[in-house]
Amino acid sequence: MQSAVTRQISAELRRRLAKASNVLVLTGAGVSAESGVPTFRGGGNSAVWKGMPFDVISSATMVRRNLPAVWEWFDYRRELLKSLRPNPAHQEIARWQKRFADLSVVTQNVDGLHQLAGSKDVIELHGSIWRSRCQDCRSKIQISRTEPRAELCLDCGESLRPDVVLFGEILPSGAFELAAEKAGACELCFAIGTSGLVYPAAGLPEIAKAAGAYVCEVNPERTPVSDICDEVLTGKAGEVLPLL
Ligand code: BV8
């Protein structure tokens, strides 16, 4: 008995999956939802921390106004992540690195679960919750899953902040440019678990589409990205991806 999702997968997509060599995957918070990581929007929730919507606490303004509060929010999320593991969606995407000659994994997520699942060369558009950055000399320090994080820069002694791109901040230099170049060169582009609201990341499927790629969305809900897709697979990433 074929599942509802299997019936959704078109012959065209199957054909393209069979012959594609250059594939780009753009993921958002939804790809980590089945690992237990709360998403920011969709599914009725929008992350709120101590009364502040996430785009207020995760913002450049808040780093200037109240860095300890920003650390508290990120420390809380990192603590939660310590007990969470990659789900079948992350694992399938990691397997795709061998399946396709040139697979680009571009993520908006900061949780590190793609890397934990085995994906290599992940383009982290919004940085990583597992890294700090010095506010002064900008040196970066990995945050361990077991040891307490450093409070001050080991090089210059100045205060550290999460090495994450907050609202109102520019993306790591080169990250978006590389992702856009890959999007412009791919034959097949998947937008997986993203609400398609946050730019410039949300512009990547449009770049792929304009360059002639076949664009496919995997999401339980419709999003602004759905309108430009060649195919929309309605379902959870952890259930749909293994069927592809
Ligand atoms: C920039 C890190 C320019 C932090 C994030 C006003 C002031 C300042 C900027 C702006 C402004 N107005 C607009 C902007 C631009 C802003 C923006 O786009 N805002 C939007 C909200 C309107 N963008 C920026 O600020 C970016 N920078 O523009 O810089 C600039 C230039 C020069 C000088 C200065 C600035 C930076 C944006 C990055 C912000 N940081 N994250 C943190 O993690 O706390 S973004 C944040 O939202 C998350 O990281 C996430 O990556 C991102 C997008 O969310 P999604 O990943 O899509 O997740 P979401 O929860 O929204 O959706 C989940 C989806 O999954 C849903 O569709 C759901 O249906 C689906 N789903 C659920 N379960 C499943 C599933 N799918 C599959 N399977 C499931 N099981």
Image: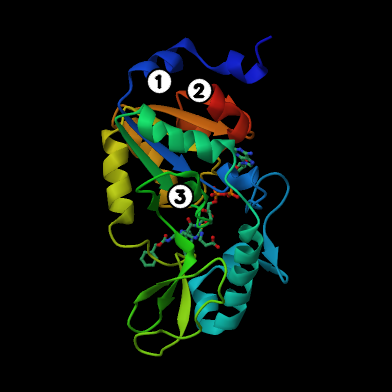
The first of marks 2 and 1 along the sequence is: 1
Of the residues shown, which amino acid type is indicated by label 2? Leu
Q: CA distance from mark 3 to mark 1?
A: 23 Å
In the rendered image, the residue lying farthest to the front is 146
Contact? badges 2 and 1 (CB < 8 Å): yes
The residue where tag 1 is placed is 17
Name the side, left or right, on which 49 lies relative to 230.
Answer: right
Above or below, 14 against 219 in this view is above
Element class at badge 2: loop
Q: Which mark is residue 244?
A: 2
Above or below, 26 against 145 in this view is above
Q: Is residue 140 visible?
A: yes
The residue where tag 3 is placed is 115
238 and 54: which one is in front?
Answer: 238
How packed mark 2 is, by other alpha carbons closer than 10 Å (few <14, some 14-19, many 20 or more), is few
Element class at badge 1: helix
